[in-house]
Image (spheres, grey):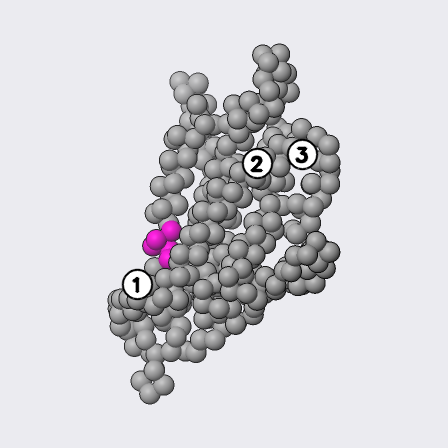
């Protein structure tokens, strides 16, 4: 009986501790997300006119959003570009970040320089970084290639090269955080496992594939999930490069919404609120499904 009472007391104390710890995040979520955004949620079901003011229109705004997604070429292009940015970031960005992280983690030649160069975009203001990148592309790169007889146009002004140039910039500036996180996860790998792999004749590539990646896969999974959740908010620094004047073929959904909110009046806010909810309805279930699949089938669980 005494043992049973002791277990019940421990279980009760554990639950009390759990709810005390989780109460503050829940309160913050309620105040800073629910309360702040409740008006935006309600606004998605309203319309506004100068003469009649606000009125409920129920799902009309959502119907307008869905029609715009499929019929407005600028918006459909923005969706395509957002998907491309996410996919390239996943396949190219994440893969290169893992390789660079492994290189830094193993302390190979120049790893300290790589660490600084990759993390530099995270400690410099984004506006300053964009100015530096633009100056390099407009002035430094042509000057460097001119002795070789190669003339380089303004890659950011030419519609044929602007998209690829900004995509490269986005990948480069995204390396820093992921590299630091991956290196931190790799540093937690037990030295005994690495030593056993060396004794077993593992090459660095085999160590990377069969030991390092599975051991840090929870971190990889987190980046994939977070990146997928933010697929429609990534604006590729287009506003820093072009302000509100980027060509439609360069738009992402994040840039379109950011510029639209800046230019919107009262009549446009309900449409934009509905647009945001539609994006949530798309990304939320997909993100949760991908998260479950990564947890179930990821190499870190085998």
Q: Which residues are magenta?
A: 279-283
The disc label shown at residue 217, or none: none
**Residue furthest to the bottom:** 51
Q: Position of residue 208 (x, y in %)?
A: 56, 26
Q: Is residue 223 magenta?
A: no
Task: Identify the residue shown where x is 57% and y is 36%.
Answer: 98
Calculate the distance from the C-alpha at mark 3 to the C-alpha at mark 1.
45 Å
Instruction: Provide the residue designation for mark 1.
Output: 70
The kind of secondary structure element at disc 1 is helix
Query: What type of secondary structure mainly makes up the magenta span?
Result: helix
Task: Identify the residue shown where x is 69% and y is 49%.
Answer: 120
Instruction: Provide the residue designation for mark 3.
Output: 104
The kind of secondary structure element at disc 3 is helix
Q: In which image quadrant can residue 108 be found?
A: top right
Q: Is residue 129 above or below residue 18?
A: below
Q: In which image quadrant can residue 96 be found?
A: top right
Q: Position of residue 148 (x, y in %)?
A: 70, 53
Instruction: Provide the residue designation for mark 2.
Output: 98
> Earlier along the polypeptide chain: callout 1 or callout 2?
1
Calculate the distance from the C-alpha at mark 2 to the C-alpha at mark 3.
10 Å
Q: Is residue 78 above or below residue 301?
A: below
> Earlier along the polypeptide chain: callout 3 or callout 1?
1
Task: Locate residue 269 relative to residue 236 in the image: left or right.
Answer: left
Task: Locate residue 164 relative to residue 280 in the image: left or right.
Answer: right
Calculate the distance from the C-alpha at mark 1 to the C-alpha at mark 2.
37 Å
Q: Are marks 1 and 2 in contact (CB under 8 Å)?
A: no
> Earlier along the polypeptide chain: callout 2 or callout 3?
2
Q: Are marks 2 and 3 in contact (CB under 8 Å)?
A: no
The kind of secondary structure element at disc 2 is helix
């Amino acid at each position: 009986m005494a043992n049973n009472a002791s277990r019940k007391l421990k279980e009760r104390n554990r639950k009390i501790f759990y709810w005390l710890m989780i109460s503050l995040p829940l309160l913050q979520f309620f105040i800073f997300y629910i309360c702040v955004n409740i008006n935006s949620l309600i606004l998605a079901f309203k319309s506004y006119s100068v003469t009649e003011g606000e009125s409920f229109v129920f799902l009309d705004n959502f119907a307008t959003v869905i029609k715009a997604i499929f019929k407005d070429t600028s918006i459909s292009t923005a969706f395509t570009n957002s998907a491309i940015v996410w996919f390239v970031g996943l396949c190219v960005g994440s893969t290169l970040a893992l390789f660079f992280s492994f290189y830094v983690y193993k302390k190979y030649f120049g790893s300290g320089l790589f660490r600084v160069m990759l993390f530099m975009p995270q400690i410099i203001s984004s506006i300053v970084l964009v100015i530096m990148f633009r100056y390099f592309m407009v002035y430094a790169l042509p000057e460097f290639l001119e002795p070789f007889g190669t003339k380089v146009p303004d890659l950011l002004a030419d519609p044929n090269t602007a998209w690829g140039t900004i995509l490269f910039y986005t990948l480069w500036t995204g390396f820093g955080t992921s590299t630091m996180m991956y290196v931190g996860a790799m540093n937690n790998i037990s030295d005994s496992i690495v030593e056993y792999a060396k004794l077993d004749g593992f090459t660095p590539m085999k160590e990377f594939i069969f030991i390092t990646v599975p051991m840090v896969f929870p971190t990889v999974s987190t980046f994939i999930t977070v990146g997928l959740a933010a697929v429609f908010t990534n604006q590729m620094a287009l506003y820093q490069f072009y302000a509100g004047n980027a060509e439609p073929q360069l738009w992402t959904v994040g840039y379109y919404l950011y510029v639209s909110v800046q230019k919107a009046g009262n009549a446009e806010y309900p449409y934009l609120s509905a647009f945001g909810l539609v994006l949530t309805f798309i990304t939320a279930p997909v993100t949760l499904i991908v998260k479950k699949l990564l947890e179930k089938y990821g190499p870190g669980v085998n």
